[in-house]
Amino acid sequence: MMDQSQKQNSHAILFEQPRIGHLTLKNRIALSPMTRTSATEDGLATEEMGRYYARFARGCYSLVITEGTYTDETYSQGYLNQPGIANQAQADAWRRVVSAVHQEDGLIFMQLMHAGALSQGNRYTDETIGPSSVKPVGEQLDIYGGQGEFSTPREMTKNDIESVIRSFAEAAGRARDAGFDGIEIHGANGYVLDQFLTDYTNQRTDEYGGSTENRIRLHVEVLEAVRREVGEDYPVGIRISQGKVNDFYHKWANGKEDARIIFESLAKAGPDFIHITEYDATRPAFDDGETLTELAKRYTHVPVIANGQLGEPAKAEELIANGKADVITLGKSALANPSWPKRVMEGEPVEEFDFSILQPQAYIKEHEL
Ligand SMILES: Cc1cc2nc3c(=O)[nH]c(=O)nc-3n(C[C@H](O)[C@H](O)[C@H](O)COP(=O)(O)O)c2cc1C
């Protein structure tokens, strides 16, 4: 039996205070972005969402990253009832979420997302766009009300690309003005930026296609534009992955060399953090041992946030202790444990995730408030 003092010292490394930009986090545990499609039809964040997010701050997550939030009133929306920050009314609606989290002494970053070819529910248009006219693999997500195959997107013109870049920057400005503590650009999981990075969805022959340097260009340009909009001192980072919501086990074709080019390119744009999501963050990214977070740390020299099956405290702690990440985010384990940091700090056991919480669809349930 552990006595109380030993209990309170458990996993101490998770409760150190890392820095992201000018911010000091009160521990190394953050909430992973999770789409819950609980906004109004016109993309307004609700009071219920404020209570849902505040619960994680109350449970001592140092940082809440919002669900992917769409950036414009044309092609970015991915799911019906997804929240947006594409206009002032949507930005204003987020203020109640921001203040609910701040009242619990938490920090909150907004994740900005453009769905591109994976859009399966968009109140502004039925057409989808992507780097090339390639039908996405897999099927629409049923937890967000989709069914069957994705549409084949229209190939984006230079104008489309410019307007995507502009939409991220303008949305970031609105998020900063609404009180968010920082921005995460969603560059992962198969959405539009990742569609540019992914060899089989990007068949372009211009400066955005072909080499890895070209395929990561849009991420870099979005980061630069957001940085210009929000200023040097405002925390901005980007999320990157190999896997996708519609292609879980995808790997970068040139392994470590791709990782070097991708991370060095991102680093040049001056992010305050890189958020890496892998199926299991502790597994080798490619064949020879290193995790993707280690590679990100080596090539960017900025704080790295790790995500993917880190709900077991000892596993999360080991990743940090071995210098492979600075912060961890929890997704499904957070849904099962809205007070995970508090529980771990106090030596209490954590619950297993039960998929029924996302059934019949992913919207927020009454018992989560
Ligand atoms: C219901 C649900 C919604 C998600 N929505 C998003 C999202 O909006 N943006 C994002 O980057 N990742 C999203 N993800 C992925 C999670 O952030 C996380 O990467 C994934 O669940 C793996 O982490 P875990 O093993 O801790 O669950 C979502 C995951 C779930 C389960």
Image (cartoon, rainbow, N blue to C red):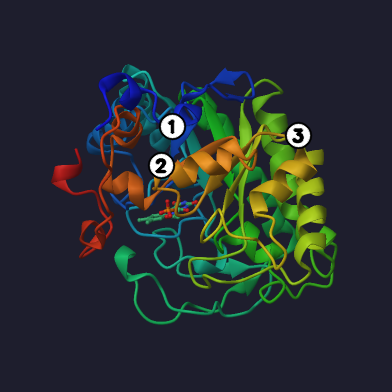
Q: Residue 217: image x %, image y %? A: 78, 54
Q: Residue 54: image x %, image y %? A: 29, 29
Quadrant containing ligand 1:
bottom left
Q: Residue 338: image x %, image y %? A: 28, 38
Q: Amino acid under label 2?
A: Pro
Q: Using the image, determine if residue 234 lies above or below residue 206.
A: above
Q: CA distance from mark 2 to mark 1?
A: 7 Å
Q: Residue 247: image x %, image y %? A: 53, 73
Q: CA distance from mark 3 to mark 2?
A: 31 Å
Locate the C terminus by quadrant: top left
Q: CA distance from mark 3 to mark 1?
A: 32 Å
Locate the N terminus by quadrant: top left
N-terminal-most mark, 3 or 2: 3
Determine the secondary structure under disc 2.
Answer: helix
Determine the secondary structure under disc 1.
Answer: loop
Answer whether labels 2 and 1 touch (C-beta < 8 Å). Answer: yes
For the point 56% across and 45% down, the residue is 306
Determine the secondary structure under disc 3.
Answer: loop
Image quarter of residue 130: bottom right
Q: Amino acid under label 1?
A: His
Tell which of 13 and 230 is nearer to you: 13
Residue identified by numbered label 3: 270
Q: Using the image, determine if residue 110 lies above or below residue 210.
A: above
Residue identified by numbered label 2: 313
Pair 3/2: label in front: 2
Answer whether labels 3 and 2 touch (C-beta < 8 Å). Answer: no
N-terminal-most mark, 3 or 1: 1
In the image, is 367 to the left or to the right of 32? left
Residue identified by numbered label 1: 11
Q: Using the image, determine if residue 205 lies above or below residue 96.
A: below
